[in-house]
Image: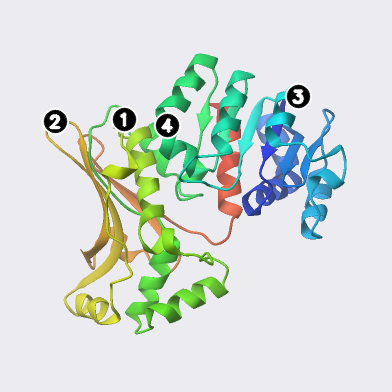
Amino acid sequence: MTVVRLALAGVGNVGQSFLELLRDKGDLVRDRYGLDLRLILAADRSGAAVDPAGLDPAGLLVLKHTGHGVATGQGGRPGATAAEALTAVEADVLLEATLTDLHTGQPGLDLMCIAFEHGMHVVSANKGPLVLAYRELTGRAAQAGRQLRFSGAVCAGLPTINIGRRDLVAAQIDRVEGIFNSTTNYILESMSANAAYETALAEAQRMGVAEADPSLDVQGWDTANKLVIIANSVLNYPARLDEVEVTGMTLVTPGALQAAQAGGRKIKLLATALRRPDGSYRLRVAPTPLPIDHFLAQTSGWEMGIVYYTDIYGVLSAKVDERGPLPTGSAMLRDVIDIYQG
């Protein structure tokens, strides 16, 4: 049995989903993989909770569900920052689930650097640091002899990163196509059935999937961020966000969607990476009419999907139907297990 000491930064929806998995899947992970996942640190806005013997995930969930912070319970350290707590413990893995800041990458970026400095692996569901500082972070991980995993940062439970990095060994990837945002896919699907944009958005917000401010989704920037991460990590292309050609879906009308369908096509907010002769990639996000029999044209509702076009493996396609934060927490659990079972 290998004891894995975990430090969780960020106990919002994704962090709480990971706590649920520790509570519900701990015995299975021990029996199947020989890993005793022991949470020794959790940090949120209230401060931190620290216990080297292990925090109780169920107890932390009760605190969060009743409107309390983790610092009010077992091992509580009110007012302590995640960075302060992280430097004071001996953890094996940092689980980075703080809020995404696409302008600075903070606080996740600093926390990930601290973790590498203290000999920890990092598992992240946070796009910001990966988009802004991918090369720096992978360099720090290599220097520390630790691993950086982030499959949950790109389409949560869909193994977009894992497929590209693990399963397409030695391939030349000529094109990547993807639907990486379930909110926009749902809205376009509703509009295809003659719902107005405002009505479809309001319904997505009512269901708790669309954010109160949906601009990152509907303007295409959430998809663009995920495309940048894929370009860096799978295509080995040092992409920047400012080189992605981005057109959102807010100008798409129900009439345009219905006209496309009448012509045997479906309009999707599509991410593409197209390989140029010099080995670089053209990166684009835009509403795109796809033939009705295209794999991604058949992603409906909340589904997301990806297609890799390769020279030696052919065309590989995958999609997922997921709702809520649990698949993202599950991807983080998958990454932790992969670090010790890979």
Among the two numbered marks 3 and 4 on one chain, the one whose residue lies closer to the N terminus: 3
Residue visible at 77% across and 36% down in the picture = 80
Q: Secondary structure at mark 2?
A: loop
Among the two numbered marks 2 and 4 on one chain, the one whose residue lies closer to the N terminus: 4
Separation of marks 1 and 2 at Cα, in angstroms: 13 Å
Residue underneath mark 2:
278
Separation of marks 3 and 4 at Cα, in angstroms: 26 Å
Q: Give whichever of 81, 157 is nearer the camera.
A: 81
Q: Secondary structure at mark 3?
A: loop
259 left or right of 155 in image: left
Q: How many marks?
A: 4
In the rendered image, residue 252, in percent from the top left (x then y), is placed at: 28, 73
- Up-down relation of residue 93 to residue 151 (above or below): above
Q: Give whichever of 176, 220 is nearer the camera.
A: 220
Residue underneath mark 3:
88
Marking on residue 236? 1
In the rendered image, residue 204, in percent from the top left (x then y), is placed at: 50, 72
Among the two numbered marks 1 and 2 on one chain, the one whose residue lies closer to the N terminus: 1
Residue 162 visible in this rendered orientation of the protein:
no
